[in-house]
Amino acid sequence: MKKFKFLPVIAILMLAPVIDYAQSQKECYNTVSFCPPQKKMGFTRNMQSLSGAFEQGDTSVVQIIVYKNMEYRISICSPSNPELTGQFQFKIAEDVTKGVWKETTQTFLDEDGVEQSKTTRKRVYEKSEVVRYDNSDDEMSQDFIFQSNQTRKLKVKVYVPESDGGEMSSGLSGSSYACVGLLVEHQPGVVSGFNR
């Protein structure tokens, strides 16, 4: 009977981190709507824009799809944490598949007992990550505008910095979380050349 007295306490202790995380996500819902858009430049908010609660010091990876001949603007903001403005590091990367030739050499003994070797070449495809943009090389700019020459899948990696002030000003129940918005905007890009 005494074993069952501690069961509710153990259940509460196990659910506390889950409840805390859910509470943080709820408080950060739609943070991206407070990020400054660039409507004057002709950009429209893309449905791939995201909001969320992130632990300080973490890196988050988001995949987006960009389409041929479209111009995109990607920006990071945290309106509830102004002390983090200008400190977000983000990279835009792409997995590129390249074909390479691999050679394998086999040695064997022929009928006369002489050692022979046979080399075979095989084409294999390797995937490697190519960083297309890194804002640490661009004076920690919090936005990036580019035009894609083909439809592709990109990875946006966002590093949420640690706050110098200790507790966050957002009022989150877990003080080590920050509300972050990843704003993706698009508009038709400039197509060069003659059109029929």
Image: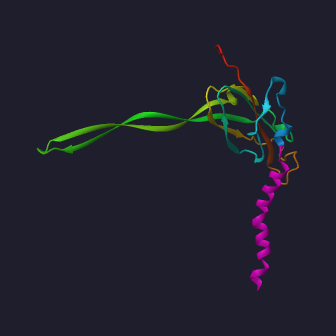
Left or right: where does residue 122 sit relative to residue 84?
left
- Quadrant of the image for the N terminus? bottom right
**Relative to residue 103, is residue 148 depicted above or below?**
above
- Give the residue at the far bottom of this rendering: 1
Tell me which residue sits at (77%, 65%) in the image. 15
- Colour mapping: rainbow
- Give the residue at the far top of this rendering: 194
Tell me which residue sits at (79%, 42%) in the image. 180
Tell me where residue 147 appears, x and y as whole percent: 68, 25
- Write down the region rendered in magenta: 1-30
Tell me where residue 35 appears, x and y as whole percent: 83, 35
Number of marks in the rendered image: 0
**Relative to residue 59, is residue 42 depicted above or below?**
above
**Relative to residue 30, is residue 193 depicted above or below?**
above
Q: Main secondary structure of the magenta part?
A: helix
Left or right: where does residue 139 sit relative to residue 31?
left
Q: Nearer the viewer, residue 105 or 88?
A: 105
Tell me which residue sits at (75%, 66%) in the image. 14
- Quadrant of the image for the C terminus? top right
Instruction: Using the rendered view, name the quadrant where residue 120 is placed.
Output: top left
Question: Magenta includes 18?
Answer: yes
Residue 181 visible at all: yes
Question: Magenta includes 28?
Answer: yes
Tell me where residue 98 appears, x and y as whole percent: 48, 33
Tell me which residue sits at (78%, 77%) in the image. 6
Instruction: Using the rendered view, name the quadrant where residue 72 is placed.
Output: top right
Residue 174 visible at all: no
Q: Nearer the viewer, residue 149 or 174?
A: 149
Instruction: Using the rendered view, name the quadrant where residue 85 is placed.
Output: top right
